[in-house]
Amino acid sequence: MTATTQQSRQHGQEQLLTPGEVAALFRVDPKTVTRWATAGRIGSIRTPGGHRRFRESEVRTLLAELTNDVGRPA
């Protein structure tokens, strides 16, 4: 965890993830995460520089939903 991450959590701000960090969680390419955001499958925030960031809570919720769907019998 970086110093910035620790400071954000201490001040009650939600952690924001980069496309690369989200991609690592889902085990996909970062470009896939960007396509999901463009298609509206996952929400994103734009930084002043135009980069995408993703709310950790939303990412973890989506990951849990998809993981639970895989584990369910058809």
Image (cartoon, helix red, strand yellow):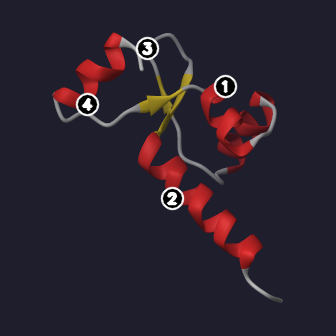
Sequence-earlier tag: 1 or 2: 1
Sequence-earlier tag: 4 or 2: 4
Q: Secondary structure at mark 3?
A: loop
Disc on res. 53: none
Q: Name the residue that disc number 2 marks.
A: 61
Q: What residue sits 45% from the left and 40% below the top?
A: 55
In this rendering, which labeled residue sits more in front, label 3 or label 1? 1
Disc on res. 20: 1
- Name the side, left or right, on which 45 lies relative to 21: left
The local crowd at label 3, few if under 14, some if 14 to 19, many if 20 or more residues have their Cα within 10 Å, is few
Residue 72's image quarter?
bottom right
Sequence-earlier tag: 3 or 1: 1
The local crowd at label 4, few if under 14, some if 14 to 19, many if 20 or more residues have their Cα within 10 Å, is few
Q: Name the residue that disc number 3 marks.
A: 48
Question: What kind of residue is marked 4?
Answer: Arg
Q: Secondary structure at mark 4?
A: helix
Q: Name the residue that disc number 4 marks.
A: 9
Question: What kind of residue is marked 1?
Answer: Gly
